């Protein structure tokens, strides 16, 4: 496991899948994601089996949040689109348990995964995509050190209209400066 102040990262287990079903049933959770349909237990099981076939480093982490002395499964995070030649990867996160929103769990998770990406996986650039309507996510990423890099105009169709996708990133030297 990888421990931080408010969260810990661990492997996703089959027993976690009912939580994913619950989270992705919620339109408010799906709103910030490219996932636009609910996922049933069978869909999640299929996703889980396919996920296990990926390299370990391309498998997501389960996020547990610390509440008092208890750890509660609250979300998922990780890297995808890994580009080893250019030392670059895309970051993704969902805190699916809404009771944990706006309490710093997202920011702590982002910082922890950045530490893993730069400190262990030797990435030089970590980027993400976020819909311009997702103010909470943007604020969370800014707090963790991501800067705005670009805008893909009318990139995503949702609720009967288009929205823009913003690209944000952190470079290794920016992360090193933040650490000091
Ligand atoms: C986006 C997400 C990861 C953020 O996690 P979180 O634990 O809520 O984030 P944090 O509490 O660390 O930070 C959220 C910040 O946004 C702020 N915020 C919340 N709603 C906001 C709004 N409408 N406008 C501006 N800021 C807002 C919070 O006040 C907080 O900032 P503060 O600490 O300065 O007060 C989480 O909400 C989530 O997973 N949402 C659903 C899936 C999703 O959208 N994933 C991201 C895909 S790009």
Image (cartoon, grey):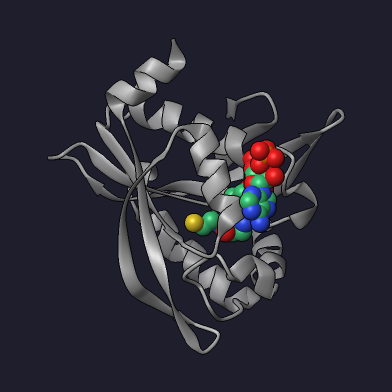
- Across and down, in percent, residue 134 comes to 55, 60
Q: Residue furthest right?
A: 68
The answer to whether residue 122 is left or right of residue 51 is left
Rendered residue at 55%/65% (across/down): 32
Q: Considering only vertical position in the picture, is 144 above or below 180?
A: below
Q: Is residue 75 visible?
A: no
Q: Considering only vertical position in the picture, is 57 above or below 137?
A: above
- Across and down, in percent, residue 1 comes to 58, 29
Q: Residue furthest top?
A: 180
- Across and down, in percent, residue 94 comes to 58, 54
Rendered residue at 20%/36% (across/down): 87
Rendered residue at 15%/39% (across/down): 86
- Across and down, in percent, residue 78 comes to 45, 46
Residue 145 in which image quadrant: top left
Residue 15 in which image quadrant: bottom right
Foreground: 166 or 61?
A: 166
């Amino acid at each position: 496991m990888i421990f931080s102040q408010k969260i810990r990262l661990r492997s996703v287990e089959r027993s976690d899948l009912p939580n994913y079903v619950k989270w992705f049933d919620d339109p408010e959770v799906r709103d910030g994601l490219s996932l636009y349909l609910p996922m049933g237990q069978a869909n999640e099981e299929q996703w889980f089996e396919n996920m296990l076939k990926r390299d370990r480093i391309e498998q997501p982490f389960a996020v547990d949040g610390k509440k008092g002395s208890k750890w509660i499964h609250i979300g998922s995070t990780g890297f995808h689109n890994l580009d080893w030649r250019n030392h670059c990867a895309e970051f993704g996160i969902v805190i699916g348990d809404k009771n944990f929103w706006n309490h710093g769990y997202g920011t702590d998770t982002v910082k922890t995964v950045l530490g893993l990406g730069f400190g262990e996986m030797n990435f030089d650039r970590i980027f993400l995509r976020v819909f311009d309507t997702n103010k909470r996510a943007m604020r969370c990423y800014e707090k963790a050190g991501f800067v705005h890099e670009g805008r893909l105009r009318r990139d995503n169709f949702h609720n009967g209209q288009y929205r823009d996708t913003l690209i944000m990133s952190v470079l290794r030297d920016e992360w090193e400066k933040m650490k000091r």
